Each structure stands twice: as C-alpha cells, then as structure tokens.
Image (spheres, helix red, strand yellow):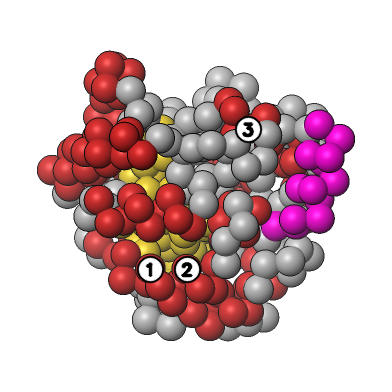
Amino acid sequence: MSIKVANAPVNFGIYRADDAPIGPATMLGALAGAGYDGIDSGPIGYLGIGEKLRERLERAGMGLAGGWVDLRYEDAGAFSAGLPGLEAALAVFAGAAPADGRFAPRPTLACPDHPPRVARDGAPGLPAAGWAGFAARVQEAADRCRDRGLEPVFHHHLGTLVETADEVERLLELTDVSLCLDTGHLWLAGGDPVAALRDWGGRIRQVHLKDASRAARDRVRAAGGDLAAVVAGGGFPALGAGEVDLAGVLAGLDGYEGWLVVEQDVPGSGQDIRRILDDQRANRDWLRARGL
C-alpha cells in the first residue's frame, strides 16, 4: 500500500513531553486498536528516544511518521541557536527509520508563532527584503536533514510567517524543500487544499489531514480570540464535520506515497481524553469507509 494512516499527539493536546494528559503506551495502544499505522512524534522525548522509542513503536505495531521542529528562520542568530535542537530531533528520527523510505519519519520544519499574526487575522508577514535570508536558512535546515538520510517537509501554519498560499509558493520558489500540506491550516489561511494538491503535488511529501471551520475561526476572532482560542472554539472539528473538501483532497492524493497524518488540534489543557479517543476512532472509521 502506498499510503499509511498515522495519528498525532497534538490530537491529545500534547505540546510538552513532561506535561501529557495520557501516557505514550496507553495512547499508542488505543490508536493501534483503532487501526492507525503510525504516529507523529509529538514533542521530542514524549514517546521516548533510542531503544525505548523503538520498543514502544514495535510493541504497538506502529511506525514513526515524523515530528515537528520549529526554528526562527527570520533571525540568523536565533536560527543558529536552535540548530542543536534540530540535530537532536534528527538523531531520534534516524534511529526509528524503517527500510522502506516511503514511510521514513519526515522532519517537519516550521516557524514558531508570529505574535502579530496570532493576534490579528491578515497581519503582515515577512517583509520582501527578508525572504532571501529566510529561505537560505530553510534550505540549510533541509540540507542538514538530508545529510542524515531523512527527507524534510516544511509545514505552513496559521499564525506564522508562512501561512498563506502565496507565502508557500514563495518558499517553494526559493528552496528545494518538500512540503507538508496541512489541509486545515491552509483552509483557515484562505487557501484551497484541493488546488494545493494540483499545483504543488510534486513537492508534497507528507499530508496532515485536518478538517477546519472558517465559521468558527471568524466567530472566535470577532470576539478578540487568538489562534489558541480558535483551536478551543472548534476551529478543527472531526473529519467530515468542517468545511474542507476532504473528498476532493483524497481524490487528489492519487499517486501520493507516504504518511497521511490525521490531526484534530485541541488545547493544551482541559482535555477530555474519552472524547478525544472517540473522535480519533471516528476519524479512522471515516477514512476506512473511503478506502484508506
């Protein structure tokens, strides 16, 4: 099979390795029982590292789909200061890579939150003069990943310096980095995930399948809420419950090989683990009913 379906700790509100509302063995067991083939790493260390990570994945029958590493590409000094963290993550991913490169962990390169954009929809992004340095540092990070035998993917994200379709296209023009298409974040940033698959398909090496609601986004932001409030306010519902043309997305995956990571972001506190598990089982059933 050319596509395998993974889940992610972000669906459980896990953003720190030392403050998780559910243990890794329990989460992996529940997701494996629901029919998932793999898992995103979440914060490095949550699933373990080295032999501990390999043992946990093997026990659950799961593969490692990849993991998030953000770096401040707009600031040369901050970027350099973050490189040890990138190298540490790459060591973890390389140690869990399978023989089949299609399903090797994808280092997921991204920007951290950009406060003006988090606070206000439509806030300006990177100045034109900043793109050359930004892209050069993304390219350096991508090259470091490839030196480890891993293919990186860049993740556009709402509330960061690369959130709109135009910004994604600019980055693709200036680098050779592959792309992680996040259907929900692109939708909330005003983009069209189906068009993205058509236009960027040759560069897409991972997909985060996420439904989203612009209606929820607009309601929350009209009340002064930020991105965290959008997440808490239902910006990312279960698959099929939002506005993203997920049927069109799945049709556009013809020929795609790799991980399809189901994501449904939830807040970092106050999680209802039973409801989350119900949603993730339902998400897997939704895909299974459509042949995945």
Q: Earlier in the sequence, mark 1 or mark 3?
A: 3
* Label number found at residue 118: 3
Q: Amino acid at mark 3?
A: Val
Numbered range of the magenta stretch = 212-224
Residue at 81 percent across and 31 percent down: it is 224
Name the residue carrying label 1. 200
Q: Quadrant of residue 138?
A: top left
Q: Give the CA distance from mark 1 to mark 2.
A: 5 Å
> Regarding mark 3 in the picture, which secondary structure is present there?
helix
Q: Earlier in the sequence, mark 3 or mark 2?
A: 3
Q: Give the CA distance from mark 1 to mark 3.
A: 26 Å
Residue 209 image point, x, y percent? 57, 61
Residue at 59 percent across and 28 percent down: it is 116
> From where the camera sits, is residue 40 visible?
no
Residue 205 image point, x, y percent? 35, 62
> Regarding mark 1 in the picture, which secondary structure is present there?
helix
Residue 14 image point, x, y percent? 61, 33
Residue at 22 percent across and 55 percent down: it is 176
Q: Amino acid at mark 1?
A: Trp
Left or right: residue 140 compared with residue 111: left
Left or right: residue 179 compared with residue 289: left
Q: Amino acid at mark 2?
A: Ala
Q: Main secondary structure of the magenta part?
A: helix
Residue at 63 percent across and 79 percent down: it is 247
Name the residue carrying label 2. 196
Cβ atoms under marks 1 and 2 closer than 8 Å? yes
Q: Is residue 48 magenta?
A: no
Quarter of the image for the N terminus: give it.
bottom left
Cβ atoms under marks 3 and 2 closer than 8 Å? no
